[in-house]
Image (cartoon, grey):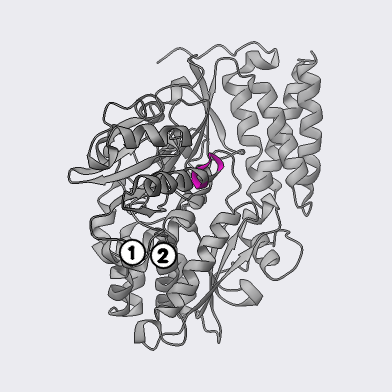
């Protein structure tokens, strides 16, 4: 929020991020220090608490509005405040200061991105409705309200938008199924239980642009005939929960929610539900169980949630990024969005660079970019300075891709062809000191402790998997042990009820196939090229 309601027109705007990553690095104390120093010097400022730009390697990134644009100062500390005032940073000075990064929009990391879903990230005060409306806010909702519902569904299908939570199911097909279902009550549920390692795009969206998600959910409700929505947020995201609750209240006061959305006659109400800390509740049916107040365990399908979801009623379940992208599609048209990407992977995806990476953060680009481009050109290589060895793509149950696969375009089908997944777009980089056998064993251990326990392949297979990998690492590299591990993986993939057990073998298999030396195994000779 702005710190001074009656700010004089001559006041200089200073932006200090308020997302949880910046807060963890002292952003609140930094904002207070800036205000105190300005008051001591008698300088008029307007302090805006914006969302993160997604350049997490520069946090806290403080910006000053100038006639040339917003000038940034990275890794800002309270000790820098006085020296920057001395340098005249409010008047465009300070360019030679050690913290100066120049015009933020010109930073190559940001300038080369294709931001659609995250176009507002860092630009606005997340709770300012005026800011939101000034940056294409409600344009998509108004367009959807003016359309026939069937035409709106077809537009979403035409856009090519697929679920960004990892499953990549076409969003428009879900919406069409729910719209066609006959029921007195329908629901929209947002899966914001972002629990994968190396992922933070949902958090940045909720903390930095909550109205985008709210607008997307309202559009989903209007189009499908659903009148209630729930945002299921992981309990480890208290700042996101607080931001969403505040934004929902303001949206309700502005007439976006309630008995008649923007006076249209369509009813839609929305609330936030806090998760209880279970990883498996990121799976849509376990999430529904939790939302209903039950233990979060996976449901057998069919029936699918689109026909029998929350409380047995037709329910659209989409991830945060999927729903936050919907307003862009309706505001600019299906063809506009479809023109980004490749093959059946249309639009953009927010790739999240994490792990042993020099410049970690969010990079939104069209499908088709490669891991090598993301790691080298955006990430700047490893933070350790050592060669990167493997990249885990798609969360803790994603595959480890060796360097030989870093030039494959990031595309759902291209990755599936090599047994990998794009997932939620999280990338965790490991350098050449990493032991992939140890990481593979951790994947099995993670599944064992996070499994809901409903199905045997996941519950028992993961426990036996930890034991078998340990025996191999202890020196029993016999063919019997290796084959037992592969058989366990096959059973988990084929017999598990959900992706928890079905995907745990992905990191294990990829580690065995590409990094056998870490298990004490000899690499299989490669077949000669034909």
Q: Position of residue 249 (x, y in %)?
A: 49, 74
For this rendering, which residue is in front, 369 or 506? 369
Instruction: Tell whether 303 sits left or right of 460.
Output: left
Q: Which corner quadrant holds the N terminus? A: bottom left
Identify which residue is drawn at 26% across, 38% down: 111
Task: Give the extent of the magenta segment.
Answer: 24-28
Identify the mark nearer the N-term, 2 or 1: 1
Can residue 495 be seen in this snapshot? Answer: yes
Q: Which residue is mark 2?
A: 211
Which is the main secondary structure of the residues drawn in magenta?
A: helix
Q: Which residue is mark 1?
A: 132
Secondary structure state at the residue bearing disc 2? helix
Identify which residue is drawn at 32% across, 79% down: 145
| Circle 1 residues within 10 Å: few <14, some 14–19, many ≥20 | many
Q: Which mark is residue 363?
A: none
Identify which residue is drawn at 78% across, 55% down: 454
Tag 2 and tag 1, C-beta contact below 8 Å: yes
């Amino acid at each position: 929020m702005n710190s001074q309601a009656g700010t004089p027109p001559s006041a200089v705007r200073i932006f200090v991020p308020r997302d949880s990553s910046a807060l963890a690095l002292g952003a609140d104390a930094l904002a207070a220090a800036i205000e105190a120093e300005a008051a001591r010097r008698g300088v008029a400022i307007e302090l805006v608490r914006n969302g993160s730009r997604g350049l997490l390697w520069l946090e806290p990134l403080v910006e000053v509005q100038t006639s040339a644009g917003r000038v940034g100062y990275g890794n800002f500390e309270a000790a820098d405040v006085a020296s920057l005032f001395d340098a005249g940073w409010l008047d465009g000075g300070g360019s030679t200061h050690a913290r100066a990064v120049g015009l933020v929009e010109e930073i190559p990391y940001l300038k080369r991105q294709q931001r659609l879903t995250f176009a507002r990230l860092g630009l606005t005060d997340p709770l300012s409705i005026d800011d939101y409306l000034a940056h294409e806010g409600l344009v998509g909702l108004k367009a959807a309200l003016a359309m026939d519902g069937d035409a709106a569904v077809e537009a979403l299908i035409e856009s090519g938008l697929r679920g960004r939570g990892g499953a990549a199911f076409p969003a428009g097909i879900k919406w069409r199924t729910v719209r066609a279902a006959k029921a007195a009550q329908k629901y929209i549920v947002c899966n914001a239980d972002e629990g994968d390692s190396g992922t933070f795009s949902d958090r940045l969206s909720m903390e930095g642009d909550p109205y985008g998600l709210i607008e997307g959910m309202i559009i989903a409700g209007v189009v499908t005939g659903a009148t209630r929505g729930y945002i299921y947020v992981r309990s480890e995201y208290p700042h996101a929960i607080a931001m969403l609750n505040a934004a929902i209240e303001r949206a309700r006061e502005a007439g976006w929610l309630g008995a008649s959305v923007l006076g249209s006659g369509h009813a839609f109400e929305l609330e936030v539900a806090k998760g209880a800390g279970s990883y498996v509740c990121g799976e849509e049916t376990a999430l529904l169980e939790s939302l209903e107040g039950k233990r979060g365990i996976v449901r057998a399908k069919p029936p699918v949630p689109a026909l029998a979801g929350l409380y047995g009623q037709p329910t659209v379940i989409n991830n945060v990024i999927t729903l936050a992208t919907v307003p862009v599609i309706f505001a600019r048209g299906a063809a506009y969005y479809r023109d980004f990407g490749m093959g059946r992977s249309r639009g953009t995806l927010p790739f999240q660079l994490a792990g042993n990476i020099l410049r970690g953060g969010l990079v939104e680009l069209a499908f088709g970019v490669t891991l090598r481009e993301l790691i080298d050109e955006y990430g700047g290589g490893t933070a350790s300075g050592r060669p990167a060895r493997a990249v885990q793509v798609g969360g803790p149950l994603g595959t480890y891709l060796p360097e030989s696969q870093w030039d494959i375009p990031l595309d759902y089908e291209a990755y599936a062809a090599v047994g990998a997944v794009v997932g939620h777009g999280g990338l965790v980089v490991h350098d050449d000191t990493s032991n992939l056998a140890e990481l593979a064993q951790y994947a099995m251990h993670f599944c064992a402790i996070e499994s809901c326990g409903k199905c045997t392949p996941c519950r028992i297979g993961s426990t036996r998997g930890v034991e078998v990998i340990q025996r191999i690492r202890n020196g029993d590299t016999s063919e019997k042990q290796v084959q037992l591990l592969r058989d366990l993986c096959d059973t988990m993939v084929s017999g598990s009820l959900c992706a928890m057990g079905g995907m745990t073998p992905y990191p294990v298999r990829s580690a065995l196939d590409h990094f056998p030396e870490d298990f004490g195994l000899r690499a299989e000779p490669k077949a000669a090229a034909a």
